[in-house]
């Protein structure tokens, strides 16, 4: 991977990116999506990219992805980022707003104090402005007044401190107070765009490597409890999953490499087993990057310990329907944007046993009410 500590060219981050001519070097955008502490899988993805020698030129982060992404863009090595992750403790980031909760109750702006989280971000980063970063970095947040998204790091949104931008992108509703900036309030960018592929495409890259942490139902039932907070969080996650599904349907193409670490069984604020989360991120990234048509030719020729060759290509997704479970409801045909199903009889029929157009959003399996659909080669 390119040494991200090397000095950047002059100009704003987006200008540095877009100044490349069509005949210039390949431009690769890395998207690190939102997902709470499941985002520690991003560290494993960075480790895999380094192992394989695959470079990236721009980082886009959402929520927890902005925390990991800004560290990489600031010049921290994978080892340094991993060291910070290893020292993560829940009490470092989440301290109850006891006074405000006692005085205001349900009218309190948040459950936890955001100042401690912001201070930890500041301690981690060697710089505090977008202009000091080693490579272009963007992170998104939602403006509460309008419901629209902003991407800090773009023209007009470069004056905010990095710690504030990352805080805003991570400020989960009800958990942290919104960031107030220039008269507006900003919160977690994952509310509306957990994997910002559409923004990445406006940067006109040759390759997009996107990490999606929202897939859950096809691996293991979420750790859901019938309580107010867990119900609210689960509702938020369901909305997030559906929005990501639509985004993947519209934006994923042959130049998009989608990495989906199998960490969906973890709770959003689960701090236990972080090394295992990192390992899963690395494992999935190695598997995808060495087999996807857009990246497998970028892998260096030298033999790497722990990798087996040849690797099975992942150009398609295998699709199956269990006729014993199928009730012919037609949800699969309605949901799938690549016409993989035909539901005109008593049972659904698979039209594409090897679906090369599948966007890997798991929408058909997640929406099947009888779990009749199974997907393979993911």
Image (cartoon, rainbow, N blue to C red):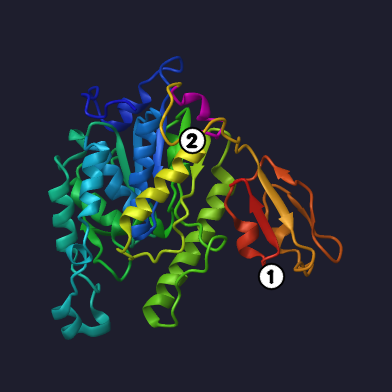
Q: Residue at x 45, y 14 (%)?
A: 23
Q: Give the range drawn in magenta.
A: 290-300
Residue 55 seen: yes
**SS at circle 2:** helix
Name the outermost residue toward the right. 345
Q: In this view, does 121 lie above or below 107?
A: above
Of 287 and 197, the residue lying toward us = 287
Q: How many labels does the image show?
A: 2
Q: How far from the left and from the top, in percent, is residue 128?
A: 15, 43
Q: Residue at x 65, y 53 (%)?
A: 375
In-image side of 5 versus 257 (left or right): left
> Could you tell me what secondary structure mostly forms the magenta stretch?
loop
Q: How far apart are marks 1 and 2 (CA)?
A: 33 Å
Q: Residue 138: x percent and y percent?
A: 32, 42
Q: Nearer the viewer, residue 284 or 74?
A: 284
Residue 109 appears in which quarter of the rendering? bottom left
Secondary structure category for the residue under label 1: loop
According to the picture, the residue beneath numbered tag 2 turns out to be 289
Q: Does the magenta stretch include residue 296?
A: yes
Asked whether residue 43 is drawn in magenta, I would say: no
In depth, the one of 258 and 232 nearer the eye is 258
Look at the picture and state if 194 lies above or below 310: below
Query: Which residue corresponds to the image point at 87% horizontal and 63% vertical from the top-left?
Result: 345
Above or below, 4 relative to 262: above
Q: Residue 370, labelled with which disc?
A: 1
Neighbour class for label 2 at 10 Å: few (<14), some, many (≥20)? many
């Amino acid at each position: 991977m390119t040494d991200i500590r090397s000095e950047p060219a002059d100009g704003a981050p987006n200008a540095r990116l877009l100044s490349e001519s069509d005949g210039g070097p390949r431009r690769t955008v890395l998207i690190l999506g939102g997902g709470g502490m499941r985002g520690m899988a991003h560290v494993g993805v960075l480790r895999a990219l380094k192992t394989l020698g695959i470079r990236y030129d721009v980082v886009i982060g959402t929520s927890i992805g902005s925390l990991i992404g800004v560290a990489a863009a600031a010049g921290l090595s994978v080892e340094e980022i991993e060291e910070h992750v290893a020292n993560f403790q829940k009490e470092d980031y989440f301290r109850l707003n006891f006074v405000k909760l006692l005085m205001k109750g349900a009218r309190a702006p948040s459950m936890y104090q955001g100042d401690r989280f912001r201070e930890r971000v500041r301690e981690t980063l060697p710089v505090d402005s977008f202009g000091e970063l080693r490579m272009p970095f963007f992170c998104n947040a939602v403006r509460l007044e309008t419901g629209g998204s902003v991407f800090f790091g773009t023209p007009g949104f470069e004056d905010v401190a990095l710690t504030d931008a990352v805080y805003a992108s991570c400020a989960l509703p009800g958990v942290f107070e919104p960031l107030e900036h220039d008269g507006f309030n900003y919160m977690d960018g994952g509310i509306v765009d957990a994997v910002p592929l559409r923004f990445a495409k406006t940067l006109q890259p040759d390759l997009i490597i996107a990490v999606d942490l929202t897939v859950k139902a096809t691996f293991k039932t979420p750790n859901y409890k019938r309580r107010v907070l867990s119900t609210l969080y689960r509702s938020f996650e369901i909305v997030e999953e559906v929005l990501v599904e639509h985004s993947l349907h519209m934006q994923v193409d042959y130049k998009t490499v989608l990495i989906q670490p199998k960490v969906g069984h973890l709770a959003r604020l689960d701090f236990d087993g972080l090394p295992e989360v990192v390992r899963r991120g690395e494992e999935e990234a190695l598997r995808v990057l060495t087999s996807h048509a857009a990246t497998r030719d970028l892998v260096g020729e030298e033999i790497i310990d722990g990798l087996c060759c040849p690797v099975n290509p992942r150009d398609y997704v295998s699709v199956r329907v269990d006729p014993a479970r199928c009730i012919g409801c037609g949800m699969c045909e309605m949901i799938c944007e690549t016409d993989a199903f035909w539901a005109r009889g008593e049972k659904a029929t698979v039209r594409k046993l090897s679906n090369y157009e599948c966007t890997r959003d798991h929408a058909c399996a997640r929406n099947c009410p009888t779990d009749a659909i199974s997907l393979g080669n993911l």
